[in-house]
Image: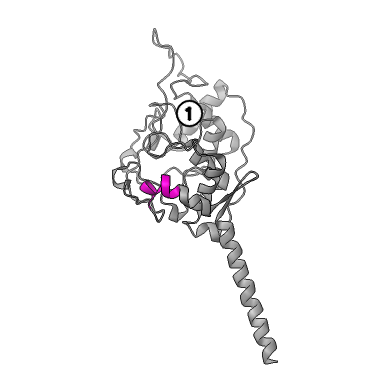
Amino acid sequence: MKYSRVRAYMSVVLALLLAAGSEVTCAQESHIGSRTGEASRGKQLYQRYCVGCHGPLGDGRGENAPWIDPKPRNFVTGTFKCRSTPTGALPSDEDLYKSVTRGFVNSNMPSWLPLTEQQRADLIAYVKTFSSRFREEKPPSPLQVPSEPEANQQSIQRGNKLFQKMNCWSCHGKEGRGDGPSAQTLLDNRGYPIPPYDFTAGTRFKCGESDQDLYRVLMTGLDGTPMPSYASGLTPDQAWDIVHYIRTLLANPKHERPRAEGEQRDKGESKPVGGATEASSNGF
């Protein structure tokens, strides 16, 4: 009888150990399409290319970090700006892969296209080992981006009104210049000042350049920054209206900025207000 109890106890212990081992193995892999990344290979890449900024512990405290603005990402918290998953959730492996591939303009994070696809997948697998969240949680299903409706004048006008109604202007400014009344007070989740995105100052957004990418940012937010998710405050059609309006603030917009009744273009003016760039770290 005693032997049976010991045997049963050992069986439970073995099952728990196997389950834990399975979680660790999963956390040390990435899955990008049909490609599997391995953390054991990614570690060497991280130590060669990433440790100077993100640090040996992945906490964003590498030897270069004091001189970098915006500060390097702290991987330990498992908090990432650019995601296809809901606010507060982990990013998918493909989200991380796209970030590594794309890089972030106006920051010290370059595009890592020089690495092979397999190397980038391996690197993502190693980055995931820094946060226990990747062992304890599973990223939820990504946000489904609905088909984009026509970006006509009516949609742009509605987006203009929503930009004001949803208080986007309080950070980004009435004309999207990043100079709203709250702009100087904003901090990221590490306590660093983080200016709002100036839509009129450059050409690229942080998390992608398409209308679908802008829609996704509105509905998922940028975790770790004051930019919230509007998934509970906007319908899909309303989000598209704001996207269409934001496009009119850029240097080379797809859609022209709507004018107030009777407003005319200045003589010789060939395009609306100048473009959008990635201001330090917040916003799109």
Closest to the observer, 65 or 83: 65
Would residue 166 appear left or right of 106 to someone viewing this image?
Answer: right
Q: Where does residue 244 sit, x and y in percent of width and height?
A: 53, 27
Which residue is farthest bottom?
Answer: 1
Secondary structure predominantly adopted by residues drawn in magenta: helix
Residue identifier under label 1: 246
What residue do we see at 64% from left, 43% from top? Answer: 33
Would residue 153 appear left or right of 103 to someone viewing this image?
Answer: right
Compared to residue 202, the image places residue 34 above or below, namely below
Residue 233: in sight, yes or no?
no
Closest to the observer, 128 or 180: 128
Start-end of magenta stretch = 46-55
| 281 in magenta | no
Closest to the observer, 109 or 254: 109
Which residue is farthest left?
Answer: 67
Q: Secondary structure at mark 1?
A: helix
What residue do we see at 61% from left, 37% from top? Answer: 145
| 52 in magenta | yes
Question: Which quarter of the figure is the C terminus placed in?
Answer: top left
Q: Where does residue 178 sit, x and y in percent of width and height?
A: 36, 33
Compared to residue 49, the image places residue 128 above or below, namely below
Q: Where does residue 18 sit, x and y in percent of width and height?
A: 62, 69
Question: Which quarter of the figure is the N terminus placed in?
Answer: bottom right
Residue 215: in sight, yes or no?
yes
Q: Picture quarter containing residue 274?
A: top left
What residue do we see at 57% from left, 24% from top? Answer: 151
